[in-house]
Amino acid sequence: MNRFLDTVEAEPKPEFWYGLPHGFLQLDLQPSPEGIQEVARQLSSLPDDVRDRADQVFRLYSVVLTLLRSQAVMGCALGMHPDERGEPTLSVLTVSTVPTSGAHPEAVLLQLLGDGGTGRGDGIVPVELPVGTGYVWETERTTVAPTAPPDGQEGPAEGTVWQGTVAIPVPRSSSIITVQLVTASVELADDYRGVLLGVARTVTFDDPSAPAADPVDDMPSPAGRSPFG
């Protein structure tokens, strides 16, 4: 089953909700010592053949917290999935909001992206979502890697990651919702792009825990449909 997050913590009542795919563990951005111990407990329950990756997971968790604590991140989840060889691959999913100070968020977004037009030739692709039009772009970049540096290297290890982003302008709140997925498994970009778009399609402004407006209607609400199966 797909889990819907019911605690977007920036406001007493969330402004939006989104689905969390299979294989993703929600991270606490302000972890207590007890919370860290709980993450360790969950990681220790992994199968023997992936348990030796626990140290890398903790390193990734530390890197993610350092990068995100200073940003307006609403939620963050760590993903672990098998690749074509059955080896575990790691990814980080983040959801955040960017205020636009009362300006039209779509105009602000396009200006931030360079206002060079949209389309595959420009690297920015519009996509229709249940909550409106979103804009997708992706890139590969070099960043700090969650592994020990090579012998003799003083600075942190670095690696290439694939980063995909979906930005959703929200005129009703003059803000931009961003859904971002990052992974070091660059060769699996097509698969992770599908996950990214799947999460973006679950974004909803309707509380999934609220009672249905018409109890006679058996049709599932948008918040109840899952693109992940």
Image (cartoon, rainbow, N blue to C red):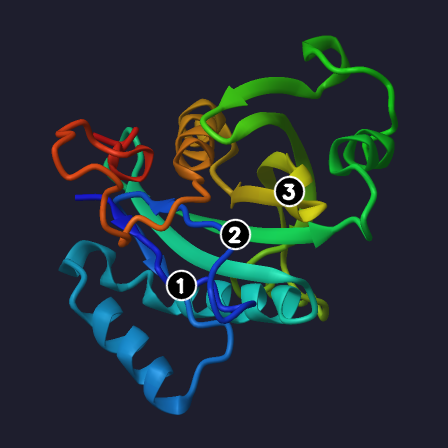
Q: Is residue 208 left or right of residue 16?
A: left
**In-front residue for pair 20/100:** 100
SS of the residue under disc 1? helix
Q: Residue at x 16, y 67 (%)?
A: 45
Among the two numbered marks 3 and 1 on one chain, the one whose residue lies closer to the N terminus? 1
Question: Dot 2, how many residues are within 10 Å of its Cα: few (below 14), some (14-19), or many (20+)?
Answer: many
Return the residue found at the far bottom: 33
Circle on res. 128: none
Q: Nearer the viewer, mark 1 or mark 2?
A: 2
At a point 42% along the width and 87% down the height, the residue shown is: 32
Q: Mark yes or no: residue 89 visible.
A: no
Label 3 Cα neighbours within 10 Å, binned few <14 / some 14-19 / many ≥20: few
Where residue 219 appears, as percent x and y from the top left, is: 18, 27
Residue named by callout 2: 94
Inspect the image, locate mark 1, and give the three-letter code of the amino acid beneath it: Val
Which quarter of the image is occupied by the N terminus? top left
Q: Which mark is residue 57?
A: 1
| Three-letter amino acid code at the position of disc 2 | Thr
Q: Quadrant of the C terminus?
A: top left
CA separation in Å, label 1 and label 2 = 16 Å
Question: In the rendered structure, which amino acid carries the disc numbered 3?
Answer: Arg
Rounded to the nearest angstrom, the CA distance separating label 3 from label 2 is 22 Å
Q: Is residue 57 left or right of residue 217?
A: right
Image coords of residue 29 (percent x, y): 50, 72
Point out residue 94 in the picture as x, y percentages from the top left corner: 52, 52
Check disc 3 and report the residue beneath it: 172
